[in-house]
Image: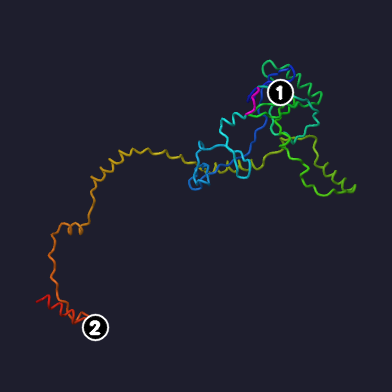
Amino acid sequence: MVARPTSSTTISFGLVSIPVKIYTATSAQDVHFNQLHKKCGGRLKQKLYCPVDDEYVERTDIVKGYEIAKNQYVQFAEEELRALDAERFPTLDLVQFVPESTVDFIYIEKSQYLGPDKGGDKAFNLLTKAMRRMERIAVGRYWSRGKVQLVLLRPYKKGLVLHQVYYANEVRPYDDVELGADQRFSQGEEDLAARLIEQLSADAFAPEQFHDEYAERVRKAADEKAAGSQITVAPEQPAAQIIDLFEALKQSLRDAKREPAKVKPAAASALNAPAAPAAEAEPTPARTLKGPRKARDKVERTTKRKLA
């Protein structure tokens, strides 16, 4: 399968210009998991939350801030950030050729393949062979995503590979690593270490011999779950229901006319019956009263006055 270039540029040094195409050299094959709602299996969405205002924030209300001190920021608008971008130049400028042995692998961040573009075949191959013969690596500058990248150009197989590398201030010194006190070893200990290394020695590095065993186990388990119908299908997100408020009110009125309020039979007969005449007060038998004698006598006198 023929590789497709991701972009193109021109190698430039001195009066030489070589048009080249850039190709992807590496791509991670990690396994990834999505976060799902345990209840329904739907995929979750992350929201941006502001703890100061206790509210979720839309992306249109976000600005970028640069921290100048603890919890102190200066804000930058998008147009201000664009103004800070490095001046764009279309070429890959080579500024030095250094011995290959002086380049430390720790600086390499990302790799891409280079191939000749139209009209650049002869110059591309001539540069490649000269660098390989002289055991040189080119140091250059390349504009990408608003900044100038430090890059290395190295002979690789029959062509060139472009390494994007870290700047010096981005690489931490190994001197900061604690190694403990210096140790002295006997000749026998050193010979033993050498024999152990020899037992595991190989003629060359063969990366195809190694596999991401964790990723393989995950994919195998996923296939087994799929074969056993243990698949979670994320439900479709329900469409937002558009409500016409006027129509909803009319429907509520129609429903109210069709179904008048129901009244319990006992309550209805009580509402429709004529009012009953007030009942005459009947004397309260003295024997039902309890309490002190004075209170009973008072009640009896009051009752007799009402009956007279």
Q: Is residue 28 above or below residue 283?
A: above
Q: Is residue 295 above or below residue 69?
A: below
Q: Quadrant of residue 145?
A: top right
Q: Is residue 265 left or right of residue 194?
A: left
Q: Residue at x 14, y 72 (%)?
A: 281
Q: Is residue 262 above or below residue 10?
A: below
Give the label, 2 or 1, closer to the camera: 2
Q: Residue at x 80, y 41 (%)?
A: 200
Label 2 SS: loop
Q: Does the magenta segment cover residue 86? A: yes
Which of the two residues, 99 or 130, is positioned nearer the viewer here? 99
User: Marks 2 and 1, Cα distance to the nearest angstrom?
Assistant: 120 Å
Q: What percent of the width, then of the height, locates residue 111?
A: 69, 30
Quarter of the image that includes the C terminus: bottom left
Say which residue label 2 marks.
292
Q: Amino acid at mark 2?
A: Pro
Say which residue label 1 marks.
93
Which stretch is magenta?
Answer: 85-89
Q: What percent of the width, then of the height, locates residue 174?
A: 77, 41
What crowding class fits label 1: few (fewer than 14 Cα within 10 Å), some (14-19), or many (20 or more)?
many
Magenta part, dominant SS: loop
Which of the two residues, 53 or 17, is positioned nearer the viewer here? 53
Q: Is residue 137 above or below residue 289?
A: above
Q: Does the magenta segment cover residue 246? A: no
